Amino acid sequence: MNVYIAEFIGTALLILLGNGVVANVVLKGTKGNNSGWIVITTAWALAVFVGVVVAGPYSGAHLNPAVTLALAIGKGFSWALVPFYIMAQLAGAMTGSFLVWLIYKDHFDATDDQGLKAAPFATAPAIRNMSSNLLSEIIGTFVLIFVIFYFTDASMGTKETVSTPIGLGSIGAIPVAFLVWVIGLALGGTTGYAINPARDLGPRIIHFLIPMKGKGSSDWGYAWVPIIGPIIGSVLAAVAFLLISK
């Protein structure tokens, strides 16, 4: 499988399942309505597992521009591949989000609250304070990337595909799933832990484009936070890893 197709499919599955659980929990009349934060964080962790299992053997399963950027800085991933990985991730995120809307369209239509309609697409802060929201995304992403560096081993593959170890088959994806799970449980309550620019921007674009009645604003005034925060967090984590590992 082509590495870019792998990133596209892996990210699409990640968003289909991750944003799908949000739709199931928050939209009116679903079987999972009001089932809570533990359901959301658990399903997001399992969504990461699925994406990594599928894409890992081919692309390294970055599934996140923050991961791609950090691996280029700290692990020697080829800079020439970075923009194409990110484009594949963004396209995959948009596709996964669009499929969530198709699946839950009746429930989107039945839901009156604009905030709940937007929640399965993009993140939003619990308390809107841009500086603290940005800090939350920086710290959450720093933890994600810094720990991922200790899951990776450049000797297990080429510089073009280095990411999480898949040498144990699907078991190699479990540590990353656990990592995302604990970040959501511990740090996700402030902003919804985007920790992935493609995960937020791609679905936000879909929310803006789809003809959904009463959907409300796509909140572009906040959209920069889950993009810039993860970028800063990933760079800081890569630099910290390089300094510590010298």
Image: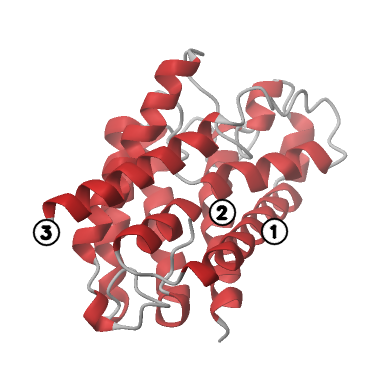
Cβ–Cβ below 8 Å for labels 1 and 2? yes
In space, the residues marked 1 and 2 are separated at their CA atoms by 8 Å
Q: Point out residue 134 in the picture as x, y percentages from the top left corner.
A: 44, 25
Mark earlier in primary sequence (3, 1): 1
Q: Secondary structure at mark 3?
A: loop
Question: Which numbered mark, 2 or 3, is in the foreground of this view?
Answer: 3
The residue sitting at 41% across, 68% down in the picture is 52
The kind of residue tagged 1 is: Thr
The kind of residue tagged 3 is: Lys
The residue sitting at 79% across, 34% down in the picture is 109
- Residue 87, which numbered label? none
Q: Secondary structure at mark 1?
A: helix
Cβ–Cβ below 8 Å for labels 2 and 3? no
Query: Which residue position holds label 2?
Result: 15
Question: Which numbered mark, 3 or 1, is in the foreground of this view?
Answer: 3
Q: Is residue 17 visible?
A: yes
Q: Is residue 189 visible?
A: no
Q: Point out residue 65 in the picture as x, y percentages from the top left corner.
A: 50, 54
Q: Secondary structure at mark 2?
A: helix
The kind of residue tagged 2 is: Ile
The residue sitting at 60% across, 36% down in the picture is 122
Is 173 left, or right, of 153 in this rendering?
right
- Residue 95, which numbered label? 1
Cβ–Cβ below 8 Å for labels 3 and 1? no
Q: Point out residue 180 in the picture as x, y percentages from the top left corner.
A: 33, 48
Residue 37 vs residue 3, the one in the foreground: 3
Is 43 left, or right, of 89 in this rendering?
left
Q: Quadrant of residue 123?
A: top right
The residue sitting at 36% across, 46% down in the picture is 235
